[in-house]
Image: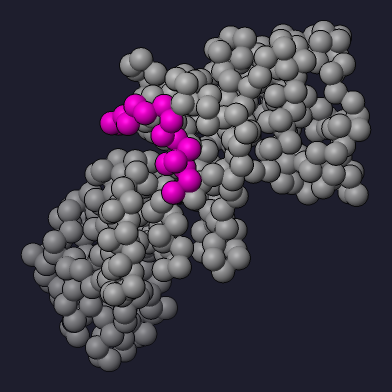
Amino acid sequence: MSAITNPAAPLAELAWRELLSQHTEDLPAALAAGPVSAYVGFDPTASSLHVGNLIPIMGLVHLQRAGHRPIALVGGGTGMIGDPSGRSSERNLQDLDTIAANAEAIRLQLAKFLDFEGPNAAKLVNNLDWLGGLGLIDFLRDTGKHFSVNYMMAKDSVKSRLENGISYTEFTYMLLQAYDYLELNRREGVTLQMGGSDQWGNITAGLELIRKSKGTDAHALTFPLITNTDGTKFGKSTGGGSVWLDPERTSPYKFYQFWMGADDRDVSRYLRFYTLLSLEEITALDEQVRSAPEGRAAQRALAADVTARVHSAEAARVAREVSALLFEKGDPRALSEAAIGALRNEIPFAEYTAPETPVGDGIDVLHCLVLLNIAASRGAAKRLLEQGGISVNGAKVQTAMVTHDALLAGRHLLIKKGQRDFGLVHVS
């Protein structure tokens, strides 16, 4: 990752990318004075980060590119408590083994964005390292004494939960996060904490603790919470589920399609938020959205960039190939074996075994249609063929058999009914 190495750059960069919500008054001077160490916390209550985490991740990326030192804090300790910010109910608590496994998975995902070598190498830390051995009496004496209950109840993350109730467990989360900031200040020289705008209350509690414990100042910066132009929550798939960075939970193809589905009204913002494309490059793509929206050039650039960073350039290429086939009338005969392998996970798939009573030499298309549940019976499959509604490997067929030389790479047939119903058959 190329570095800008201009300490004052992050705020200007975040501002034009519309990623700056608020910050403490003296932060610009602190950044301009030289490299600072800054951290963002990540909740390990799931085994993967999701696209909603990409904003703070990109904040760390921009910070590092400007020559500052990013610290990614995996909340192995606080993850056992749960942050009440932005929630209407208390989350389920996780056990130590689950938290540890999730933290390691997140560490690997963050390594795709941040450089962990060089003069401003990123560092990953786990707050379980200090919270795990923290005694209750010591915590109450050294941290709790600095905060009144009135101060804590005035924070939005607490106020929003008072009507339905908040447990003492979650009520103390603010103090634990403040303690994290103080501990990182002591251990790593961290003087800046960043997070979503709903974290402002927790972050400023950390500033208060550092000031009262050490008599020194620290800084805060928050990013806006992202929503789509239509008012829906950003980061949900068309089915309503989260879009994960883990390819086992959200395949690279589905990840790519999530970005391809960006509304024309949103895509320019997303290019600013989630890529490192320059203002000039994004402006040129904006013009294409206005002049030729049907080409979806901006969505292609967004999907390719983010998929390559999260998964790999090859995964992005394969996702693009599959997308072109399914949505742009691509030629099945040009499919790579990698794309065919990806298709097996995205469309109906079946292993072909010849019927007990073959109707001729070759591969029985009627049998394939039944195997794929495209047709309920051989009779229904035959009617589809006669009506001209079936294509095999991109060509319309009206006969019940196709020859083995029609097979795609890896001995597959791609079968399509109409314009959108696909199925893939592997012929052994």
Q: Position of residue 356 (x, y in %)?
A: 28, 68
Total marks in image:
0
| Image-based side of 16 in relation to 76, left or right | left
The residue at the far bottom in this view is: 387
Q: Is residue 164 visible?
A: yes
Q: Residue at x 22, y 65 (%)?
A: 413
Q: Position of residue 299 (x, y in %)?
A: 35, 61
Nearest to the observer: residue 12 or residue 340? 12
Q: Quadrant of the N terminus?
A: top left
Q: Which residues are magenta?
A: 1-17
Q: Residue at x 37, y 46 (%)?
A: 275
Q: Residue at x 51, y 59 (%)?
A: 237
Color style of the picture: one colour
Q: Position of residue 76 (x, y in %)?
A: 63, 23
| Image-based side of 368 in relation to 192, left or right | left
- Quadrant hosting residue 173: top right
